[in-house]
Image (cartoon, rainbow, N blue to C red):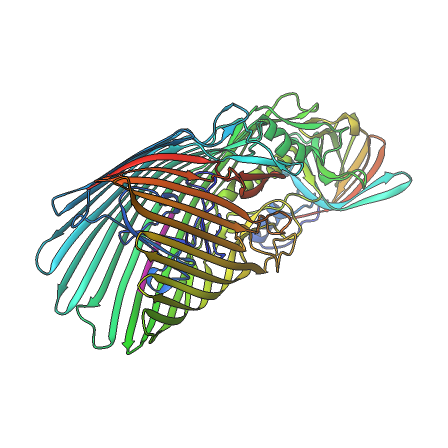
Amino acid sequence: MVPSLEIPDYGASLTSTIYIRGLGSRMENPSLSLYIDNIPVLDKNAYDFSWFGIHSGTLIRGPQGSLYGRNSMGGVLLLNTQKPMGGGTAAMVETGYPGMLQLGAMGTAGEEHAISGSVRLSRGYFTNAYSGKPLDPYTGGVLRWRWDRSISAFTSVSNSLHLNASREGGFAYGRYQDGEIQPVNYNDEGSYSRISLLDGFKVSHTGNHIRLNSLTSVQLLGDRMRMDQDYTPESIFTLEQRQRSAGITQEFIITPERSFGHWRPQSGFFCFGKLNRMDAPVLFKEDGIRSLILDNANRNIPEEYGYLDISEKSFPVNSRFLLGSWNAALFHESVWVLGRWVLTAGIRFDYEGGYMHYNSDALIHYRFVPIMTEAKEFKTSYTGHRLQHFFEVLPKISALYSIPVSSGSLRVYGNVSKGFRSGGFNTQIFSDILQGLMMNGMMEDLGVYLDNPREGVSAGNTQYKPEEAWNYEIGLRFSAGGRLTGQVDAYYIDCLHQQLTVFPPGKTTGRMMTNAGRSRSIGAEAELDYRHSGFHSHLSYSYCDARFREYIDGNADYSGNRIPYVPLHSYYFEVDDRFPALGLTWTVSGELRGSGPIYWNEDNSRSSGATIDLGATLGVSWGNCRLYLRGENLLGRQHPAFYFKSIGNEFFAVSKPRRLTLGITYII
Amino acid sequence: MRQILHIPAAALLILAALSCSTDDINELDKKEEKGYIGTVSVEYNGETYDNPNIKVSYTPSVDGRTANLKIFKIKFVPQMPVRVNVTIPGIQVWQEESITRFYVDDINPLSLGGEFPKYRVTDMNGSISGNEINFSLNFGEYPTRYSGACVL
C-alpha cells in the first residue's frame, strides 16, 4: 500500500529484507528503522509487523537521521499499540486455505492496562519435493501488555511490553534450471525459531515550562536458524546459527511546555548498548567435502603424485562471536511556524562503536594417498578481535508552504536530509576465511605450495563502515471537499560508501566487505484517497530508478546497472464499499497490486517483468460481529520474489499461492 | 692450525652463536640446523631449469655421521603446478679437514607425508665449505644441482 516500500516475502523472519526508495540490503543493518511505542527496535531479527493490537502506524519515507539516527536511512516505521484509555475490546478468529488458524484478542483493564495477544498456526504454502512434507509451517504468538498511569498532574509513566515467540520453516528456494524455477528440493532442515522481548518504560514530566520525556528499554532476543546452505538434494553444507542478544536503550527528549511564539524546539540525547553472543557452525558434509575442499585442492596436484583425502564424512567449521555495539547521540530540531510557512531545521551528532571477538576452528584428519599410510590430524584455528568507531553528523532542513485554496488544503514542501545505516562486521564471511586457512594450511602442512594460492582474507576484511544517504525531495499534499486527499512527491537520493561484498581484485574466492559502492535513486510517488459515505478508494504509485553509480566487485564493473530487488514501478489500487442490505451491513472490497520490472542481480542478467496480484474481501456485520471472506492472489499466479546464487547455482523464491481466509471479529 | 680471530669475548660469543663457519665445530653446531639460500638447477629435456631462491636446511645427527637435507618449495619441471618440500633422510656425512662431505647412493626422499619413490634419489654427492653448500643428485630421471650460501 505504501509507495516505494518493498518487503519481499521470502525465506523466514530472519532473512526478510526491507527496501525503500531503492535503499536496502540483505546485510545485518536495515534501511528502515522500526519503533514500537517510541521504542527503537535495535535488532532487525526482532522486526515484527503483524500482530493484534496495533492502534496506528506511520511510515515516514526518506532519511530521518536527525531525529531517529541509525538505520533510518530509508525511513522510519512508527507503530503504536492500543492505549488503555479509550481502548476497546476485540476478539478475532481466522481460518484459511491452505491450512491456517489465527486467534487474537485485545482488551483493557480499567484505565491503566491494555493487553493483546495473538496466535497463528499455518501448515505452510510450499512443499519440499525431497521429503514430500510442508516446507514452511509456522507456529507463533505475540503477547503485548501496556500500562499507563498518571502519577500526578505533572508526571505520567507508562510501560509497554512486547513478547514474541515463533517457530517456522522457510527458505522456499527453488533452483533455476533450463529457464524454469524448479520445485523446492533439498535434503537438510530449514527452520527459524525466535523468542524476543521488548520492554519500554516511559516517564513524562512537565515542570518549569519544560516537558521531559525519558524512555528506557530492555531488548532481549534469542534465536536459532538452521539452513541447508546449498539448497540441493546433495549433502554439501549446512548452517546452524544461534544468537542471544541483550540491549538497553535510553532516550531523553526535552520540549517546551508551550511554543516560544513561532518557535517549537526539541532536543534530546540517545544512547544504547548491545551485546550479542553468536554461535554459527557450518557443517561440511560428504558431498561438500569433496566438491568444495578436496576437488579444489587436488585440482592443482598432479595425478601421478596421488591425491588428498579427508577421513571425516562430515566436520564442522565452528565460529563463535561476541559482538558489542554502542551508540551515543545528541540531537536537536527546531520548527518555525511563520504564517503559511513551516520551516524545520535539525541536526544530530551520532557516535557509534562496534566490537567483535571471533573464535573459529576446524579439526580434520587428512591423508595424502597413496604416500601417507595413516591419516594425520590437522587443526585450524583463527581467533582475535576487532574494534571500530564511527561518527556521523546528520542535518535536515525542510520548508512547507500552505497555499490558500477555496476549499480543502494545498501544501507544497521541499526538504534535504541525511541518514545512515550503521557499520559493523559481516560474520558470514568467517566460514570462508577458515575454509581458506584450512586449505592453505593443510597444503602447507603437507609441504605443497600452489603457484596461485587462494587469496587470504582476514577478519579486517569483514568490517564495513556506515553507509550514508542524502535525500533531496519536493512534493505537495492536498485535500479537497472533505473527501479527497493526496500527495505527490519527487526525490533524488545519493547513497555513499555503499556496503558491498566484493572479491579481492582478480580473484573469484575469498569475499570481503567494503564500502566501495555509490548509488543513486531517482523517483516519484503519488497517493490518492477518496471517501464518500460508505465508499472508499485508494491509489498509490511509485517510480524508482535506482542504479549503481560506482560498483566494482573485484571482477566486474556494475556501474550504471540497476540495483537488484528494487522494482521500477509499483502500484496499489483498492476499492471498498459498505452498504446496508437485508438488515445487515455489507462490505465489498477489491485490491490490485503490482510491481516491476525488477532486476535480480548486479550484472542485470536476471530480471522479471511486471506482476499483478488480485485480492478481494466480502464481509457482513451485525451488532458487534463481523464475518468476512478474504481472498489473496486470486489469479493464482506465483511470481519471483527473491533471487540469489549459491556455489554456482541460481535460486528463486516465488510468492505465495492463492489463499482464502474466513474470519470473524467481535468488537466492543 | 686453526685461525682464531682476536676479538672481544662478548663478540666471540655472539659470533659463535651466529656463524656458519666450520672453524669452530663443536657439539652444539652438530645439533643445529643450518639454512641456505641458493639455486636448484634441474636438467629437463636437454635444458636446464633453474629454481632461484630455494631454501635448503641441513640438519646433522648428534654424532655427526648422518644428516637430513630438506629442500623447500622446489619444482622439478617448469610445468609442475605446485612446489613441494622434499627431505632426503639419513645421508652419510664425513669431515675432510674443514670441509663437510656427504653422500647417499640410493634412497626414497620424503615428501607429501611419506616416501616419494617417483623422485628416488640416486648418486647424491655434496659438500659444505665455509658458508657454502653444493650438491648434485638425481631426482628420479632428473639430474639436479644445488649451490647455496648460508643465511643467518
Which is nearer the eye, A572 or A192? A572
Residue A325 counted in the magenta span: yes
| Residue B104: image location, x then y, percent | 78, 29
| Residue B140: image location, x then y, percent | 82, 30
Q: How many discs appear?
A: 0
Above or below residue A665? Residue A482 is below
* Residue found 14% across the figure and 69% down from its top: A209
Residue A308 counted in the magenta span: no
* Residue found 77% across the figure and 25% down from its top: B117
Above or below residue A145? Residue A303 is above
Which quarter shows the C terminus of chain A? top left
Residue A462 visible here: yes
Which is nearer the eye, B26 or A83? A83
Determine whether, in the image, residue A584 is placed left or right of residue B147.
Answer: left
Determine whether, in the image, residue B105 is placed left or right of residue A286.
Answer: right
Instruction: State which quadrant residue B129 falls in.
Output: top right
Which is nearer the eye, B148 or A583? A583
| Residue A158: image location, x then y, percent | 18, 51
Q: Which secondary structure is most common in the magenta stretch?
A: strand
| Residue B11: image location, x then y, percent | 58, 53
Magenta segment, which residues? A324-330
Instruction: State which quadrant residue A226 falls in.
Output: top left
Q: Residue furthest right?
A: B46
Residue A3 visible here: no
Determine whether, in the image, residue A529 is placed left or right of residue A650.
Answer: left
Determine whether, in the image, residue B11 is placed left or right of residue A467.
Answer: right
Q: Residue furthest left?
A: A152
Q: Residue furthest bottom?
A: A339
Q: Residue furthest front?
A: A582
